[in-house]
Image (cartoon, rainbow, N blue to C red):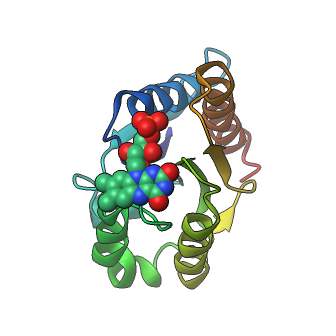
């Protein structure tokens, strides 16, 4: 049976759209089989999406040194309904930050620690001036790492 990878990405700008597309493309790498990739904005994603996935990647901008309000709202809606059901869920994070992204990273880690989700790697922070070549490659790699790890049963 195929596994579901849920991508929950806040995409308020062309750059963040490009990063989400790269992540999606990486997760659908031709060498990876049996992973259904579902891309949702935080506004669209709901409890049923989280309960039915085997892995999740969260993407946000750095807003006022925190995660986007949209992603925070997503967490507020899914936290208690998912708390007992999704412990151990493998997750990845990418942050598009003009500054250093540390407040955003800390805020997300606080919430996912409460949920007892499992990080597949340290959060990816695409920080500073937008570097398309580097950031796109990093997001593609994150998508492929997650999808390949789910396929192989590593995560
Ligand atoms: C309310 C608000 C607060 C923001 N605060 C920050 C911030 O603290 N740091 C930052 O780098 N960008 C901040 N931004 C800019 C967004 O995060 C921006 O959409 C994001 O950096 C997109 O990256 P891009 O400019 O490469 O498209 C803020 C945007 C909004 C709407």
Q: Is residue 30 left or right of residue 65?
A: right
Residue furthest top as drawn: 30
Q: Is residue 18 left or right of residue 128?
A: left
* Residue 146 in the image, given as x and y percentages of width and height: 65, 42
* 128 or 9: nearer the viewer: 128
Residue furthest left as drawn: 44
* 2 or 136: nearer the viewer: 136
Q: Is residue 95 visible?
A: yes
* Residue 136 in the image, given as x and y percentages of width and height: 60, 25
Q: In percent of the image, x 39 and y 30: which residue is there?
A: 17
Q: In percent of the image, x 45 and y 64: which residue is there?
A: 67
For the image, the number of numbered tags is: 0
Q: In percent of the image, x 52 and y 25: which residue is there?
A: 22
Q: Is residue 8 visible?
A: no
* 54 or 13: nearer the viewer: 13
Q: Is residue 49 left or right of residue 148?
A: left
Q: Is residue 101 left or right of residue 58?
A: right
Compared with 26, 58 (above or below) is below
Compared with 36, 94 (above or below) is below
Q: In percent of the image, x 61 and y 14: which residue is there?
A: 30
* Residue 116 in the image, given as x and y percentages of width and height: 61, 79
Q: Quadrant of the C terminus?
A: bottom right
Compared with 76, 18 (above or below) is above
On the image, which quarter does residue 128 sit in? top right
* Residue 98 in the image, given as x and y percentages of width and height: 54, 47
């Amino acid at each position: 049976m195929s596994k579901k990878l849920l991508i929950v990405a806040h995409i308020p700008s062309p750059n963040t759209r490009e990063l989400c597309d790269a992540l999606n493309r990486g997760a659908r790498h031709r060498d990876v089989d049996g992973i259904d990739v579902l891309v949702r904005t935080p506004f669209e994603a709901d409890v049923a999406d989280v309960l039915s996935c085997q892995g999740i990647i969260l993407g946000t901008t750095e807003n006022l040194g925190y995660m986007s309000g949209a992603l925070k709202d997503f967490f507020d809606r899914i936290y208690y309904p998912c708390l007992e059901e999704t412990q151990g869920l493998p997750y990845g994070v990418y942050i598009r930050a003009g500054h250093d992204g540390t407040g955003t990273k800390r805020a997300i880690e606080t919430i996912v620690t409460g949920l007892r989700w499992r990080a597949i790697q340290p959060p990816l922070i695409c920080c500073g001036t937008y570097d398309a070549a580097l950031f796109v490659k990093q997001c593609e790699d994150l998508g492929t790492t997650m999808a390949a790890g789910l396929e192989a049963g590593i995560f």
